Amino acid sequence: MRRTKEGFSHASEGLDERGASRRDDGALFFGRMGGKERWIRGTTHVAGRHGARWEVVQVSFWGKGQQWLRSTPITDPVDRRNAPFMQILLICMGCLMPINKVIHLFSTRFRDSMTEPGLGMDMATDVLMMVAAWSALYMIRQGRFREAVRMYISLMLVAAVLAYAAIGLERLSNDPFPMLLLGLGGLMLGRKALWSVYGVLMLVFVVGTLSDVLQQLPKGSVEWQWGRKASMSVSYLMVAILLDRTIAALRESLSESNQRGHELEAANRQLEHEMTERERAQGQLVHSQKMEAAGRIASGVAHDFDNVLNVVLGYAMRRERLADQGTGALIGALEGVELAARRALAVSRKLLNFSRQDNLMPEVFDAAQAVREMQPMLRQLFDADTRVRCEVEAEASLPVYLDRGQFELMLLNIAANARDAMPEGGHFTVTARQASAQELELVLADDGCGMPESVRRHVFEPFYTTKPTGRGTGLGLAVVRDVTVAAGGDLAVESAPGEGTVFRLRLPLVGHRESRPRNIEPPLAGVA
């Protein structure tokens, strides 16, 4: 081993520079110790090759053992958690019982042990407990956890009755198995099993006491030792009460936890349902606003169609004169008809696409270009006495992530409110500019009647309107604010009586969004 600038390295074949063993295929061995993966290093040439490999084998064996203990087809979560410990206990009982008996026989010399009273029954009960342990282990591996524990405790109690009847309570007063059975019954099977085991153990102690009396009768004197037996019974009673209270508290906590889990699951389902209903209602609201806006611009679209039809009609009325002028004149007239028809198709498709009810599809688009394309439709929304102007820099590019139909709807809703505020005409201006490196700003201003502070404060509340009945729903700006906030933006309004109204709408530019459109509370919005 030599020290290099990077650390210690091994020159021996089969070790890498970190001292970790290699497989035959060159893969490095590593293990998990204390819940963390780490390379196992060797301290010397020999220890690095063999000691590290031995640690890896130990780690691998323990991991496989844990996996084997947990691989039981048990459905109940509590029983599944108890199964590994119960299996380890049963394996220890099945292996240690014969080993303990052999050690006992040889430590007391085999011949002396064979003369002990009740030896045959003692060995028979040991065999019974060993068989019970291995049988219970097999049943747990089959997924029958509670049946296995019941069977094991029952056979252990039968063995206890036989052993205490043959040997007596005095000689078995230090036997730990009664306490083990009491704990297993309570912790694994519950309170009912706990008190059932306690009752059987009291019967076992009575049988052991009678056995002691029968063994003392030939001597002519009987020592009952009531104080010691009463103390033992009270000790077991205290342990049983302690286990009962502990089990009851654990079961109550588990029940409360399960109940809270069910309530939370029900609340989640209700929340999902409400969110779905909210999205559906919002989609219907947006569609209704689209239809309302489409109706408002219908008159302007009709004017465009009148112009188109007049062009077509003019060419048709000149058909005879054009025929006299030859084929070239007819072709030119037909080209004019085609251009007029294409313009009519573009107008109708724009209106149909806008009013169609689609699922929201956020996309990246240029807000500046969208404002330019919206200018003809905005002009159709106002009377001839109103001047509409869109101020967008020719080379401006303002990419945003939003549903384009909703973006157009926001402009139309604000423009519709501006139109109603200018019944005798005026000016409506839409300005799109980059407010900062992160945001764009849309400013929509009119020089209409304006509104007092008492109205301005409530202008973003749902269903708030100052229009006559039948002319407004109070939901126009509700949609505008809802869409703006959901897109991560902000909306503000400035107004005063006689000074017009200015809406300032800010949206994050693509690349500077903190989040995608998010769910929000019902919009504090609406318009007159």
Image (cartoon, grey):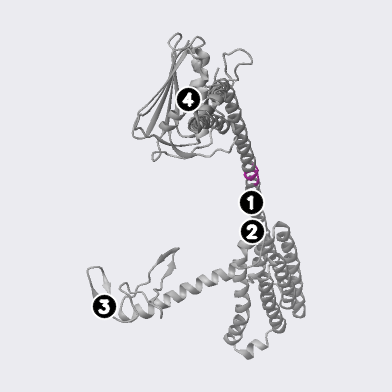
The amino acid type of the residue labelled 1 equals Leu
Q: CA distance from mark 3 to mark 2?
A: 52 Å
Residue found at x 70% / y 70%: 152
Question: Is disc 4 surrounded by few (<14), some (14 to 19) or many (20+) residues within 10 Å?
Answer: some
* Mark 2 residue crowding within 10 angstroms, few (<14) / some (14–19) / many (20+): few
Q: Main secondary structure of the magenta part?
A: helix
Res. 465 mark: none
Taking the image as shown, residue 416 lies to the left or right of residue 439, namely: right
The residue nearer to you, when weighing 348 against 191, is 348
Q: Which residues are magenta?
A: 262-266
Which quarter of the rendering shows the C terminus?
A: top right
Query: Which mark sits nearer the N-terminus, 1 or 4?
Result: 1
Task: Give me the C-alpha separation between circle 1 and circle 4.
Answer: 67 Å
| Earlier residue among tags 4 and 2 | 2
Q: Does dot 2 land on a helix, a strand or a loop?
A: helix
Q: Which mark is residue 376?
A: 4
**Distance in Å between CA atoms under marks 3 and 4:** 83 Å
> On the image, numbered disc 1 is attached to which residue?
254
Spatial separation of the CA atoms under disc 4 and disc 2: 70 Å
Type of the residue with mark 3: Met
- Lower sequence index among marks 3 and 2: 3
**Residue 263 belongs to magenta span:** yes
**Secondary element at image label 1:** helix
The image quadrant that residue 137 belongs to is bottom right
Which is in the foreground here, disc 3 or disc 1?
3
Marking on residue 1: 3
Q: Could you tell me the amino acid type at mark 4?
A: Pro
